[in-house]
Image (spheres, grey):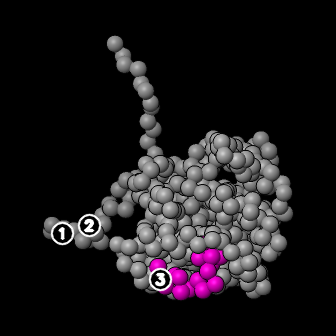
Amino acid sequence: MAKPKFKELRRCYGFDEVAIMPGDITVNPDQTDIELTIGNLKFDVPIVAAAMDAVTDVNTAIQLSKMGILAVLHGEGVQTKYDNPQEILDEIVHAPQAEMASILQKIYSAPIKEDLLAKRIEAIKKAGAICAVSVTPANTKRLVPVITAAKADMLVVQSTVTTARHVSKSYKGLVLSELCQSIPIPVIVGNCVSYSACLEIMREGVAGVLIGIGPGAACTSRQVLGVGVPQVTATLDCAMARDTYFKESGRYVPIITDGGMINGGDMCKAFASGADAVMLGSIFAQAKEAPGKGYHWGMSTPSPVLPRGTRIRVGTTANLQQILFGPTSVTDGTQNLVGALRTAMGFCGASTIKEFHNAEVVVAPSITTEGKAWQRGMTCSS
């Protein structure tokens, strides 16, 4: 007798397990168009700096904006809780690893100061830069008036897992459709990993969706909660939701693959899997200008009840210009990310990011190990 199945499991894939198939024609990398549009805003480069205190502060937001890149300020981080954020960042950087969880919990338990939030936004805007601010759903209603009054250009509503429908007995939760209709700036929402959740979020009127649960270098949500989907599969599924929504509405909502990328190859695989942009944290944390000074920690690390992350040392490797545009001084793919993207697109015959979405992606678990014994420190027989 055949046994009934309780659940059918499907295979999902991460960046290390796939490769991009080159095209039948090639395009000069200099002729590729990688422009990103979110709402009424355009960016020269489809890379977003994560809303993490070790990555984005006022200075890096300004510098990256001048390079054509969107940087997101952590609206509930040290920049908006402390008048002297660099002293607090130094305390985090120099704290013993064994005491890290409690120190982060203490630091981030400080209240958000609305005047500081406005001050940081105004400083970015005064420099002529585009300003995006990330907040959690729980604080969105309270902080949106401050963010819009300070003339921010974009709002990012971000939590570990976001859905269009939230069940709660305590109070009326954040209604995304009402939020999008009530403020004059584009709203990006995240994070999600499934076709259905992404489609429902898009139907709320958002301008973009962040894709990824737990893949970040400093995040441990997958270990703590067991929740998440490898980024290639998550991106493919949410790209399908984007295309479904475009067919039904005529409105194109970009998806932004958030986390899990440690080099240019991973980033290119995200785009070939359907991403319109990528959000990077640990790569930017390695910049000389990064406020984390060679360290990196996740947004959910200081949770007072269930910390899901850790402080990691990523080191300081190059300045922002070199990481993004080269020239590269390393061979591990962590510098000249824009050059890597344009070159991969050229190899696949793609002139635009949307054309790059059509590149074939194959299952290739040996793509990073085949023939690389010497690079991996293994002894080869003669």
Residue drawn at the location 47% of the way across and 83% of the way down: 91
Whether 132 is drawn above or below 123: the answer is: above
Whether residue 224 is visible, yes or no, is yes
Pointer 3 residue: 91
Coordinates of residue 58 in the picture (x, y in percent) = 66, 82
Pointer 2 residue: 373
Q: Residues within 10 Å of mark 2 (few under 14, many from 20)?
A: few
Kindly report which numbered mark, 3 or 2, lies closer to the viewer in this rendering.
Answer: 3
Instruction: Give the extent of the magenta segment.
Output: 77-92
Q: Are marks 1 and 2 in contact (CB under 8 Å)?
A: yes
Q: Quadrant of the C terminus?
A: bottom left
Residue 14 or 315: which is nearer the viewer? 315
**What's the residue type where badge 2 is placed?**
Ala
Coordinates of residue 223 in the picture (x, y in percent) = 40, 54
Q: Quadrant of the N terminus?
A: top left
Whether 305 is drawn above or below 249: the answer is: below
Pointer 1 residue: 379
Q: Are marks 3 and 2 in contact (CB under 8 Å)?
A: no
